[in-house]
Structure formats: C-alpha cells, structure tokens
C-alpha cells in the first residue's frame, strides 16, 4: 500500500511533502520518544506521533520512514513543514488520538 | 575519508545534521545498508547527547574500507556515574528536552546496541568523549 492510498482510506490531511505520497508502507510505529523510534522503527514504516517539532522529520529521513502522521489535530511547526518538503517526507494529520489511529492503520495494513 | 562537524549545545534545530551528512557519504561510497543503519542510530544519539547536555562539541568520522570510526568530544558538565548513565531509562535531561521526546534514557543503550566497539570517557566539569567503531567488513 502506498502513503497516498493510506491517506485516502483513513481520511488524512496532507500537511507537507506530497512528493512522498507514492512511497510504499511497510508497517507502522507509534511513539513520542525520539530515541525509541530511532532505535527500533524500520525503513518504510509510518510513524504516528504527537511531536510536532522539526526533529521528527530529521529522524524520519535518517530512518527512511515512509510518512509521519500527527495525531489529535496537532499542527506541525513552520520549520517542520519546511524540512518535510526539503526531505520529501510526507507529513499527514488526523484528528484521532494515537490509539485509535494506530488501530485503524493496523486493520488497514493487516486485514 | 575524514569528516568533521562542530556541534553547538542546545541547538536542537540542527540536531542530526552530522548524522545526515555521514549517512549521505556512506551511501555514496556504496557501504552496505545494514551498516549505514547502525552508524546512523549510534551517531544520531551521540550527536543529540552533545546538543542536549554539552556546551559544544566536535564530531569526527573516519571512514575506511574496513570500518567507520566516530569520535565525539564535548565540553560540558561531564558524567559523574557512567554506569548509571548507561542504564536504560536513566536520564538527566531537562523537562523541556523531555517534552520534545528526547531524554528518555535510551540514547547510550541505543549506541551500545549498534556499535561494535563503544568507549566512553568523562571528566566531570570538563566534558565527555565517546568513541564508536562499526565494522564494515
């Protein structure tokens, strides 16, 4: 499944980095601790978090994650958006909280 | 090939710049992806440690066909009890840093898991030196 297909299926708002919408999704990782994601997420995963500062894009790029989803309607910082565009990391938004969104993504990826 | 970077303590907006540059260089050199992944995790954590705890630091990366050697020398408060600092979950990071999702006490354990050789030496009141070796072959 591509990031674009996930965004459509789960009614996500595209906040930045549309260039990355065709990337394939290899799973998901839900965490707000940056070292947890750094140490344990794998390439191709979608990262679900409430962190909105630009370090999330640096990590997503370094780890080659497919996309970042901000939960609870949180808006990214302006420099987060700028870096997402530069690094071609798709940044998406949902109004749901992490538990609910993770559950819906899990069901979508592993029906 | 040698790369070197100056890191400013407290500058979270630039955190990861050195890791990103080293990753790009390793990719250009055609280094195995699994090796690059380990270098990225270890170096990012060590880089963030300077940003979160030290006043300033210098990172050097020596890349040879056999190994990647990373040395991070900082001027900062140092670590009084390294064994404690290595304990997963232990952190002295400020509340502000924790709210950003850093300072979870996973940095040094992440370095340890990804390095083939990991040395840490600290003088309280002066600074900390971290050396990480990751074998390519």
Image: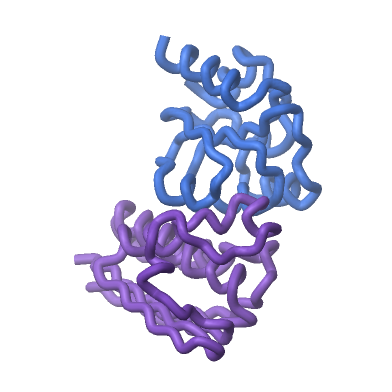
**How many marks overall?**
0
Residue B76 vertical placement versus B20 (above, below): below
Colour chosen for chain A: blue
Q: Position of residue B112 (x, y in %)?
A: 33, 63
Q: Position of residue B118 (x, y in %)?
A: 31, 73
Q: Is residue A101 left or right of residue B45?
A: right
What residue is rendered at 49% in x and 62% in y?
Answer: B44
Q: In the rendered image, is residue B20 in sight? A: yes
Q: In the rendered image, is residue B3 in sight? A: no
Q: Position of residue A73 (x, y in %)?
A: 76, 28
Quadrant of residue B16 within the rendered picture: bottom right
* Camera-side residue of B27 and B46: B46
Q: Is residue B31 left or right of residue B54?
A: left
Judging by colour alone, the chain drawn in purple in this rendered image is B
What residue is rendered at 57% in x and 23% in y?
Answer: A99
Residue A111 vertical placement versus B131 (above, below): above
Residue B14 vertical placement versus A72 (above, below): below
Please name the colour scheme applied to the rendered image.
by chain
Quadrant containing the C terminus of chain A in the rendered view:
top left
Which residue occupies the extreme right position in the image?
A: A78
Quadrant of residue B130 within the rendered picture: bottom left
* Camera-side residue of A45 and B45: B45
Which residue occupies the extreme top position in the image?
A: A111
* Camera-side residue of A14 and A47: A47
What residue is rendered at 72% in x and 37% in y?
Answer: A16
What residue is rendered at 68% in x and 21% in y?
Answer: A96
Q: Position of residue B120 (x, y in %)?
A: 37, 78
């Amino acid at each position: 499944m591509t990031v674009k297909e996930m965004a459509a299926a789960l009614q996500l708002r595209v906040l930045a980095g549309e260039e990355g919408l065709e990337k394939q999704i290899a799973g998901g990782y839900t965490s707000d601790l940056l070292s947890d994601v750094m140490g344990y997420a794998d390439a191709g995963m979608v990262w679900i978090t409430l962190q909105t500062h630009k370090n999330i894009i640096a990590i997503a790029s370094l780890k080659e994650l497919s996309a970042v989803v901000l939960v609870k309607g949180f808006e990214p910082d302006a420099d987060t958006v700028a870096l997402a565009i530069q690094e071609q990391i798709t940044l998406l938004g949902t109004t749901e909280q992490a538990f609910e969104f993770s559950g819906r993504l899990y069901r979508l990826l592993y029906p | 090939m040698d790369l070197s970077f100056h890191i400013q303590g407290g500058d979270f907006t630039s955190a990861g710049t050195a890791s990103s540059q080293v990753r790009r260089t390793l990719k250009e050199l055609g280094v195995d992806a699994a090796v690059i992944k380990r270098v990225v995790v270890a170096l990012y954590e060590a880089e963030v440690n300077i940003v979160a705890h030290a006043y300033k630091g210098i990172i050097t990366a020596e890349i040879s066909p056999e190994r990647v050697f990373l040395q991070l020398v900082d001027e900062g408060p140092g670590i009084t009890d390294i064994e404690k600092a290595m304990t997963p979950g232990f952190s002295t990071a400020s509340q502000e840093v924790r709210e950003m999702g850093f300072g979870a006490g996973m940095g040094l354990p992440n370095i340890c898991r990804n390095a083939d050789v990991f040395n840490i030496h600290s003088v309280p009141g002066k600074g900390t030196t971290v050396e990480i070796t990751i074998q390519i072959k």
